[in-house]
Image: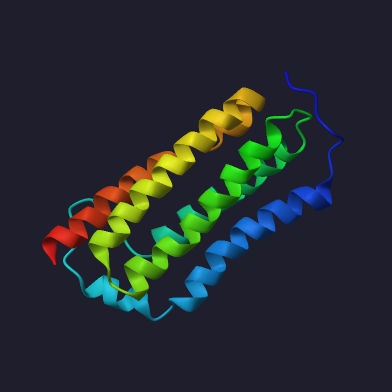
């Protein structure tokens, strides 16, 4: 088990708030674009619109807590893992702008592949430092895989 710095509620809440804030900012910027999504032909298994904010909120909570746990690791590998963490969060925040905002469905799909790769790499780096922090990202990878299916389906059907 990796040695860690002392637990800080405030630092943990900051990590969670940044992750939730990234998602909230995208949602705020795109609040009217979701109506356009509802009008699209969507692939089978597409969940109702109300599922997305619930799932993303849980994923951002897990992401923030996981990132915080890595920030506590006393290892020279911590900085590279956190760098990938912040890069994937940035990539994540831009995807809705491409998909919902611009309607660039194919571009958004390829962007999502880059995001998926970054998250997978992050999980690998996290696993070397804190197995639980890495495992907390597995639902995120599954959801991104499902989002890729939905994204590609929207591109092909519209």
| Residue 124 in the image: above or below residue 23 | above
**Left or right: 20 as drawn, with respect to 155:** right
Res 62 visible: no
Residue 32 visible in the shown view: yes
Query: Relative to 21, is 56 above or below?
Result: above
Residue shown at the point (31%, 60%) measured from the top left: 108
Residue lying farthest to the bottom in this orientation = 32
* Farthest right residue in view: 6
Residue 74 point in image, percent of width and height: 79, 29
* Colouring mode (rainbow / by chain / secondary structure / one colour): rainbow
For the C terminus, the quadrant is bottom left
**Going 79% across and 50% down the picture, which residue do you hit?**
11
Q: Residue 24 at what x, y percent from top left? A: 55, 68
Q: Nearer the viewer, residue 120 or 12?
A: 120
Query: 122 left or right of 149?
Result: right
User: Against 48, is 122 above or below?
Assistant: above
């Amino acid at each position: 088990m990796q040695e860690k710095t002392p637990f800080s509620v405030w630092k943990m809440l900051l990590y969670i708030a940044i992750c939730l804030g990234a998602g909230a900012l995208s949602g705020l910027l795109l609040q009217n674009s979701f109506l356009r999504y509802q009008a699209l032909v969507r692939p089978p298994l597409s969940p109702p619109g109300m599922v997305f904010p619930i799932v993303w909120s849980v994923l951002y909570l897990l992401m923030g807590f996981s990132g915080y746990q890595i920030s506590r690791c006393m290892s020279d590998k911590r900085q590279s893992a956190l760098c990938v963490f912040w890069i994937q969060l940035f990539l994540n925040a831009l995807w809705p702008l491409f998909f919902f905002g611009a309607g660039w469905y194919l571009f958004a799909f390829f962007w999502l592949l880059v995001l998926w790769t970054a998250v997978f790499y992050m999980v690998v780096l996290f696993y070397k430092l804190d197995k639980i922090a890495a495992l907390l990202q597995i639902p995120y990878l599954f959801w991104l895989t499902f989002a890729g299916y939905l994204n590609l389906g929207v591109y092909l059907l519209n």
